[in-house]
Image: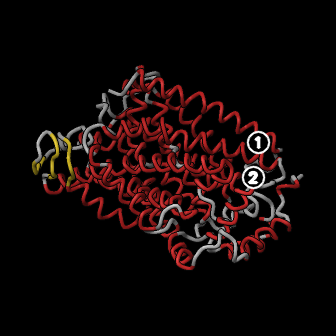
Amino acid sequence: MMELEDCYSSSTQSLIDDYYRNEEDGATISKEHRKELETSFGHKTIGFFGGISLLIGNMTGPGMVGIALVFQEGGWVLTLAGFIVIMLTSTLAGLFMIESMASIPGNPRFQLRVEFTMLCRFYFGKIGYIIAQIFINVALQATNIASIIVCAQVMDNTVDAIFHKTCGLQAYPSVEWLCVSGTTSDSSPFPGYMFFTIGYLIVLVIIIPLGFLNLDDNIIVQVVAVILMFTLTTSWVISFMINGLSTENLPSFGSGTGIAQIMGNVMFNYAYITTLPSWVNESKPTVNLRRAVWVSASSSTFVFVATGIFGALAFANMPLSSDILSVINSHHGNILTRISVYVFPFVVLASSIPVYSIVVRYNLMQNGLLPKWVANGVAVLLPWLVVIPFMTGNGLNYISNYSSIFFSSIANFIIPLLIYLKSIQFRRSHRKMTAEQQQILKTLVAETIDWEENQHKFTYYAEHHSMFKVFDKLKRIQSAKISLACLIILGILIPLVIVTTFVFPNS
């Protein structure tokens, strides 16, 4: 039986209509700001397959290229267990956060645009909003930095393969124009620290323009990227099997250092939860959100495990500063395999960079925090400047592990579950809003440029008159217990990861 407060009541509709029509209200926005909003946010046009492609693209990011090394160094038993646990808990955390969005009055089926940071502000106030801005910016920007590193390194290897050398401006140990040739098992062909490389500049020119688009404008890119990703990873697994596999390369349990790195890498691959609100805001009302999230998570996990296990079985003693791309390239496989190494970053990693930039921009612009040009500078351009010290060596490994520990793990796993538990309290109080929450709701309605269109779609689809819930057949208290169990599991794992990473730092 549906709980009374989960129904979309006429009194709530009247409240929202009053907020929307009140021209003297403090939340009313200027014509200039409204015009800026119309070009700064997407509309509800993302379908089911497009949404799956977007979510898979967000998961199959830079951490994916290090999975084979994690399996080899940490052992397959604990690594596989880590993937299963984090897949289940992260998926539930994401779905519970989506239900928290639906708990906001007037938003049972996501008529309003509610980004991650504004969701935090509604339930936790201004302090929660500030904390959310810090965590989501650092978490997503760290992922972008790691993606840029891999793309630039592989592009340099591509340039070297075609022209027999690649060049760049070296910063240390001496400032000079440096050209190198020949592949190595390390991720970057350059020995020192670089200001920039040819590969970096090529990637910059290709990717940055996509970051200035909206999320729904990037869906075609995401669909093509996911299709090619499955094609490439399948070809890798087949190639690994043809060239020979050895069980000696994949221990059941690895070294202490290897085990310490497992959860950091695994969590980094599921650091997509903070992007879910932006996807929900631009999904068509007919999309089955639950199914889309579960299909995306399970498909990505299958790819992670397959490439990790078969990659570890295929290559012995992978260097700690390497990834699967550099290892494949250094072993001089067949021409198709080597081409796939050069193509992979642009169909998988490069496609996720503009998405994270867009999500960061959305969160910085909603509630009028920053104007569009400043938000674009922070979201799109800043990572390309921060990335410079990490373009060579094992900087990617440090970014993956430490950003997962301090920011991505909390932003993607802890905060969403805390939001859900807070939303349960809000629903128990019959959605009685404070003065600050009322003002936030006014702002959300005013800044949702397609609110009237969304409301029409909501009333048109009769089956959407009930609030979105993760478990339709479970009572609210049962869902709360499941979320609390996830929070306890992750609350134990994350500090454990922090301790083990410092005790057994990556070499």
Which residue is more in the foreground, 293 or 250? 293
Which residue is more in the foreground, 266 or 251? 266
Point 63% across, 31% down: residue: 489
Which residue corresponds to mark 1?
A: 479
Which residue is more in the foreground, 11 or 327? 11
Is residue 310 something one can see in this rendering? no
Point 33% across, 39% down: residue: 323
- Quadrant of the rendered image containing residue 287: bottom right
- Asked whether the beta carbons under mark 1 and mark 2 sit within 8 Å of each other, the answer is yes
- Quadrant of the rendered image containing residue 15: bottom right
Instruction: Please tell me how many numbered marks the rendered image carries.
Output: 2
Would residue 186 appear left or right of 79 to someone viewing this image?
A: left
Residue 456 image point, x, y percent: 73, 76
Marker disc for residue 469: 2
Would residue 429 appear left or right of 289 to someone viewing this image?
A: right
The C terminus is located in which quarter? top left
Which SS class for mark 1? helix
Would residue 428 appear left or right of 506 to someone viewing this image?
A: right
Residue kind at label 1, given as amino acid type? Ser
Point 57% across, 60% down: residue: 278
Q: Residues within 10 Å of mark 2 (few under 14, many from 20)?
A: many
Residue 497 image point, x, y percent: 50, 28
Which SS class for mark 2? loop
Is residue 232 something one can see in this rendering? yes
Q: Earlier in the sequence, mark 1 or mark 2?
A: 2
